[in-house]
Amino acid sequence: MKALPAAFMSLALLLPLGAAASDAANASPPAASAASSMGLHGMVLFGGRDGLFASHMPMFHRPHDIQVLLQLRVADAKRDAELRQALARRPALWTLVPEHFELDRFAPDAPMPLNQFKADWVKGHFERGGKVRVANLQFVVEHVLLYQRLSDAPRQADHFDYVRIAASAQAHEQFWVKRITARPDADQILAWPLTHHDGQATAPPAELSVASHGSVRAATPRELMEALRAQGVALAHPPRELYLETGDLE
C-alpha cells in the first residue's frame, strides 16, 4: 500500500442482510479484546470513472472510533470498470460490507498494513434494506487518504472542516468529505464535477472550513458552495450530497 503524495493527502435502522449476502458479511467476528479494532467495518463507496473511494462508517466507540478514507480498486479489472461506470452513471448511495479485519491496520505506522480485503458491493445502505449487487469482491487498497481517531469530547468548534478527495488534482470527479471532530457530529460526503473555463480547470483548495450555526452538525451544500466561492472557486450549482449520517455519531 503506497503512501499518497503530499499534494493529495488532504484532497480525497439495524436490519439483517438479505439471503444474498456473502459468507464474509455473515461470518461470526473473530475473538477480540476490548481495545481491539477487529470488526465488520461498513463503508460508503463513492467515485466514478476517475477512481474509487471508500469511507468507513465510524462511531464514537471501539472498534469503530476511527475515520478512514481509502482509494482502492477491484482486483478484477472487468468488475472494476463495471463498478466505476455504475457510480459515474447513476450517483446514489452504495456501500461495502467487508470481511472482518482490524481497522487499525490502516494506520500510517501499522506493523501489518491491510493491502486488500473482500467485501460485498451493496446498492443502498447495507443495514437499512440495501441489496447485494456483487458478493465477495476482492478490493486492493491503493492509498489511505485519511486516518484519524475520533474524540468523544463535547463539540465546541465554530466551523466545519472538509477535505477534498479526488484521483488527481485535475480529475473531473471531485468530492468533499467532512472531518469528524467531536461529539455529536455528522458523517457527510458531497460530490461535484470539476468545472472548466476556456480549457482551464478551476483550482479548488485541498481543505475548506465552513462556519457552523448553533446545533447544526454539517454544512448544507449551498453553504459549502458559498465557502468555495469565497475562495475564488466558481460553481454553477451546489455540490450534491451523497451521504449524511448523524444517528451513529450521537
Image (tube, rainbow, N blue to C red):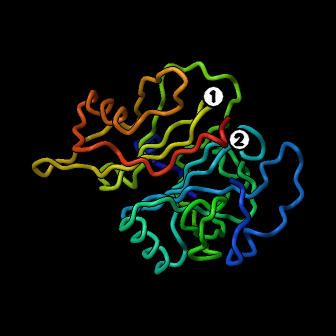
State the residue lying farthest toward the left. 198
Residue located 53% across and 36% down the image: 179
Closer-to-camera residue (196/112): 196
Density class for disc 2 (Cα within 10 Å; few <14, some 14-19, many ≥20) is: many
What amino acid type should be assigned to the residue bearing mark 1? Ala
Q: Which residue is mark 1?
A: 182
State the residue lying farthest toward the bottom. 78
What amino acid type should be assigned to the residue bearing mark 2? Asp
Q: Is 36 placed left or right of 221 in the picture?
A: right
Closer-to-camera residue (215/76): 215
Say which mark, if any, is on residue 135: none
The percent coordinates of residue 206 (x first, y second) are 39, 38
Q: Which residue is mark 2?
A: 65
Density class for disc 1 (Cα within 10 Å; few <14, some 14-19, many ≥20) is: some
Residue located 69% across and 55% down the image: 41
Per the model, the C-alpha gap separating discs 1 and 2 is: 11 Å
In the displayed structure, would residue 90 be above or below residue 237? below
Q: Is 36 placed left or right of 243 in the picture?
A: right
In the displayed structure, would residue 30 be above or below residue 241? below
Determine whether the residue tagged by mark 1 lies in a helix, strand or loop. Answer: loop
Residue located 63% across and 70% down the image: 120
Residue located 66% across and 70% down the image: 118
Quarter occupied by residue 219? top left
The percent coordinates of residue 146 (x first, y second) are 55, 44
The percent coordinates of residue 139 (x first, y second) are 58, 68
First along the sequence among labels 1 and 2: 2
Name the quarter where the N terminus is drawn.
bottom right
Name the quarter where the C terminus is drawn.
top right
Quarter occupied by residue 230? top left
State if disc 2 and disc 1 touch (CB < 8 Å).
Answer: no
Determine whether the residue tagged by mark 2 lies in a helix, strand or loop. Answer: loop
Closer-to-camera residue (151/200): 151
